[in-house]
Image: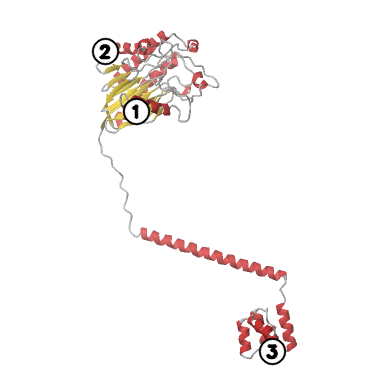
Amino acid sequence: MTSHERNKRRMARLPASVRALVREGKLSADRAVRLVGVPEREALRIASAGLTRAQFRAAALEARKAPPLAELGAAERARRDDTAARRDLRRALHRIDELDATLRAYERFTAEPISPIEPVRFRAGRRAGAAVALLSDVHAEERVERTEAIPNAYDLAIAERRVARFFAGVVWLTRSAAAQTFDIETLIVWFGGDLIGGDIHEELLERAEVPPGAAALMVRDWLVAGLRVLLTELPDVRIVVPCSVGNHGRTTQKMRPATGYGHSWEWLVYQMLGHEFRAEPRVRIHATRDEMQYLEVFGARLAFHHGHRIRYQGGIGGVTIPAIKAMHRWEQWRPCDYYHFGHYHQRIDLGQIAFNGSVIGPSPYSFAIGGAPEPPTQSFYVLDALRGKTLSCPIWVAERDEQ
């Protein structure tokens, strides 16, 4: 490569302003090539300084020297600070644009006054309804001693108080529903079985305060007294009492589907109730020989069963899954709108299916099988003539100091 070609390549590397001085004749090509690698501003200063040849070469050489590391670090920090400042400026401008858009939207929305929201006003009036109360799983004569593991005590005296609280709760809730919306002319009170503990297990004989027959007579007296309270406190209400036998009140070793009623202390109690109120037109005792009892109110079909035919072996979902399966099986025989069960001492309301709680509450047996220590509760709801089941709630049958 000739010296001319080398100088030509070097000239191409010079800043445009320096090449312009060469074209204008203000700077020779020999001097210009010595400015290769010199910053443009410094190159222009040297070219226009009128230096001698030796001074020019020395100035160009000095200008091409790399700056100290400290100067390079300062320059890099300055560059980064400048980049960060530009980034922050862009973000700030973007945020200003967002706020400006929000302000314009707010001004657009508030340009006209917002109309006030008018509350929905329901039509005044009352509807027909029937009250439904569930009483089951009293286990009247069983004795429960309060221990560190069992947060409950139970005996005949406590059982009688809790049954009385049930009937008082039915009165209070029926009046409350009637005071608000409903014209209640019918009260359904289900006696759902296991009103006594019986002697179907040997342990029950040890825990029972009285034999099954004596317990049955005591329960009969409690139920008679409770129904008379309802007649007195709710003078305008007709009382329908569907009655189901449980598995504890039987006198046989196993439950008998066809003749179980005839071997049940509870079915005998229900017949006594029918005899007791045979002259009372406002009370109807409904105790057939079937395990399932049926009623119809406002066109809705109600089914009542103690629940001992529902088999539950544990699993996710609790007793609700077996109950739904059992309901579908029973639907093949007679479709119903609402099913009522007891037996499992758990108050669960699934809408179409309702499980009642218990009067006895937590016991060593429920602890042994891993049941939840549910407080002693029974159930109440109102059957709206137009919309069906509503106002479902528990009846707390235990005193506060008993829990």
Please give the label number shown on residue 242. none
Q: Which residue is mark 3?
A: 50
Q: Which image quarter is the N terminus in?
A: bottom right
In x, y percent, where is residue 127?
26, 32
Taking the image as drawn, is residue 171 in sight?
Answer: no
Q: Which residue is mark 1?
A: 381
Q: Say few, some or many: other residues with alpha carbon within 10 Å of mark 2 (under 14 / 14 to 19 / 20 or more).
A: few
Query: How is this picture coloured?
Result: secondary structure
Q: Which marked residue is nearer to the observer: mark 1 or mark 3?
A: 3
Q: Which residue is mark 2?
A: 278
- Cα–Cα gap, marks 2 and 3: 137 Å
Location of residue 331 (image quadrant): top left
Q: Say few, some or many: other residues with alpha carbon within 10 Å of mark 3 (under 14 / 14 to 19 / 20 or more).
A: few
Q: Secondary structure at mark 3?
A: loop
Residue beneath the point at 61% across and 89% down: 23
349 relative position to 294: left or right: right
Residue beneath the point at 61% across and 86% down: 20
- C-beta proximity under 8 Å, tags 2 and 3: no
Q: Secondary structure at mark 1?
A: strand
Instruction: Name the residue nearer the viewer: 10 or 191.
Output: 10
The kind of residue tagged 1 is Tyr
In x, y percent, where is residue 225?
34, 15
Taking the image as drawn, is residue 166 in sight?
Answer: yes
181 relative position to 357: left or right: left
Location of residue 192 (image quadrant): top left
In the current view of this chain or complex, which residue is farthest to the bottom? 25
In the current view of this chain or complex, which residue is farthest to the front? 1
- Cα–Cα gap, marks 1 and 3: 110 Å
